[in-house]
Image: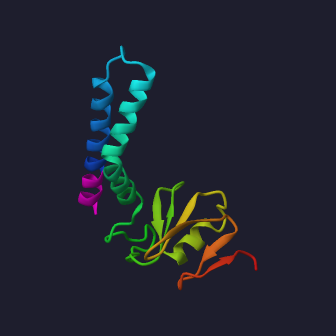
Amino acid sequence: MLKEKIERMREEAKIENASIENVAKTSSNKTWAKRREDVDAGWDTNRETYLTAFIKHKALFQSDICSNCKISIVHLAVRCRTCSEHYCPDCDWAYHCKKPFHDRELFEESSSRPILPSECILPNGQVIEKGK
């Protein structure tokens, strides 16, 4: 898992370094229109690379485990950006029931979505309102 995260960081650093090098090569003598044209051309050239890096950054790893109970959470997981942790649905509810303002996101097999402060996730993936 650590090796995968390090590799992901290296890939993101390569993209960032390439962008910085492209900006450094631009001359300040160019007109604004020409500089904008160069930026747009750079975006068109690297669009697929940026998209791939973005998707890899958002995705869960195959080896992700619940930060609390240590079970594998490949098919259904909650990522808390506030805690910087991943949880299974049971542990997410237990931990976040009194922390409604944490920024959480539900990851299912083929999609993800934000979780509202008033929502909790059942082990089968069903999203329900707290207190109902």
By secondary structure, the bulk of the magenta-drawn segment is best described as helix
Q: Foreground: 34 or 71? A: 34
In the displayed structure image, the side of residue 6 where residue 101 appears, left or right: right
Q: Is 3 contained in the magenta span?
A: yes
In this view, 111 is above or below 30: below
Q: Foreground: 74 or 50? A: 50
Relative image position of residue 80 (x, y in whole percent): 52, 60
Relative image position of residue 27 (x, y in whole percent): 32, 18
- Which image quarter: residue 51? bottom left
Q: What residue is rendered at 30% in x and 44% in y?
A: 45
In this view, 34 is above or below 80: above
Q: Which residues are magenta?
A: 1-8
In this view, 24 is above or below 51: above
In the displayed structure image, the side of residue 11 where residue 129 appears, left or right: right
Relative image position of residue 132 (x, y in whole percent): 76, 80
- Which image quarter: residue 122? bottom right
Q: What residue is rendered at 29% in x and 43% in y?
A: 15
In this view, 102 is above or below 113: above
Q: What residue is rendered at 35% in x and 44% in y?
A: 44
Q: What residue is rendered at 27% in x and 24% in y?
A: 25
Residue at the outermost bottom position:
124
Q: Is 46 contained in the magenta span?
A: no
